[in-house]
């Protein structure tokens, strides 16, 4: 069986662990860079990206994650998607730069700070997982403002990409770990 890590410094890592179990994988909670060598892939959860960045600064974990992402699949959700991006706006902050994306934090504004939307994912997403609409939980979500060449958008909300794939990596601005639908996690597991 493949070994999937969930970065467990801050945020809703336990919900990702439970989602991985529902999708048929056994999660490993990652807090130290020494743990990365044993993993086939890693999930960076939602939470607060600035806090996560600060915690990643200790112990050289930030650089270790950049190196890990050069060889292994990484999936970032919400704050994790912010960390995946090459360019972070409002305010600008450091990131791993694993995906060629511009992402704007807290960009939906207060009125839709947090909401549940029902999306019609792209046919390719449905073909690779299973057919059907996708419930997306947005919590103070960022908006992806630009996707680089070679990036595939697998789901949109209100005209903006919300689930994107580039090579081995995946990013979602919503929280698939908070619904019973395991397709997004299953898609990531397919990449390992
Ligand atoms: N607003 C958070 C940030 O900017 C992300 C929110 C989340 O992960 N649910 O880091």
Image (spheres, helix red, strand yellow):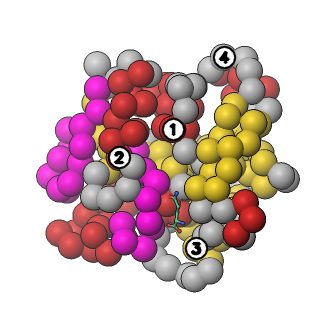
Residue bearing mark 4: 130
Label annotation for residue 101? none
Mark 4–mark 3 CB contact (< 8 Å)? no
Q: Which mark is residue 88?
A: 3
Q: Nearer the viewer, residue 96 or 138?
A: 138
Q: Earlier in the sequence, mark 4 or mark 1?
A: 4
* Magenta segment boundaries in residue numbering: 26-52
| 86 inside magenta stretch | no
Q: Is residue 94 above or below residue 62?
A: below
C-alpha separation, residue under disc 4 versus residue under disc 2: 25 Å
**Label 3: few (<14), some or many (≥20) within 10 Å?**
many
Mark 3 C-beta to ligand 1 under 8 Å:
no
Quadrant position of residue 57: bottom left
Q: Residue at x 62, y 77 (%)?
A: 89
Residue 133: percent from the left, percent from the top?
74, 27
Quote the CA–CA distance across marks 1 and 3: 24 Å
Q: Are marks 1 and 3 in contact (CB under 8 Å)?
A: no
Residue at numbered disc 2: 13
Badge 1, how many Cα within 10 Å: few under 14, some, many 20+? Answer: some
User: In which quarter of the view is residue 146 placed?
Assistant: bottom right
Q: Nearer the viewer, mark 1 or mark 3?
A: 1
Q: In the picture provided, is 159 more to the left or to the right than 22? A: right
The quarter in which the C terminus is drawn is: top left
Residue 100 rendering spot, x and y as whole percentages = 61, 61
The residue carrying mark 1 is 178
Query: Tag 4's secondary structure?
Result: loop
Task: Check if mark 3's residue and mark 2's residue have beta carbons within 8 Å.
Answer: no
Q: Count residues near mark 4 (Cα–Cα under 10 Å), then give few for <14, some for 14-19, many for 20+.
A: some
From the viewer's perspective, tell me whether residue 30 is left or right of residue 50. left
How far is mark 2 from mark 1, CA to CA? 11 Å
Magenta-span inclusion, residue 45? yes
Regarding residue 131, the answer to whether it shows in the image is yes
């Amino acid at each position: 069986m493949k070994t999937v890590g969930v970065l467990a410094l801050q945020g809703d890592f336990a919900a990702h662990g439970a989602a991985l179990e529902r999708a048929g994988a056994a999660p490993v909670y990652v807090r130290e860079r020494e743990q990365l060598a044993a993993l086939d892939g890693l999930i960076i959860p939602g939470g607060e990206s600035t806090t996560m960045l600060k915690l990643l600064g200790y112990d050289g974990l930030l650089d270790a994650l950049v190196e890990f992402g050069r060889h292994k699949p990484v999936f970032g959700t919400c704050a994790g998607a912010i960390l995946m991006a090459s360019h972070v706006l409002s305010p600008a902050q450091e990131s791993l730069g694993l995906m060629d994306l511009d992402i704007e934090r807290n960009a939906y504004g207060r009125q839709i700070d947090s909401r549940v939307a029902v999306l019609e994912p792209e046919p390719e997403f449905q073909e690779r997982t299973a057919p059907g609409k996708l419930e997306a939980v947005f919590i103070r979500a960022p908006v992806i403002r630009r996707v680089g060449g070679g990036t595939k958008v697998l789901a949109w909300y209100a005209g903006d990409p919300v689930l994107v794939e580039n090579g081995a990596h995946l990013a979602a601005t919503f929280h698939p770990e908070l619904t019973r639908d395991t397709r997004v996690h299953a898609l990531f597991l397919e990449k390992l």
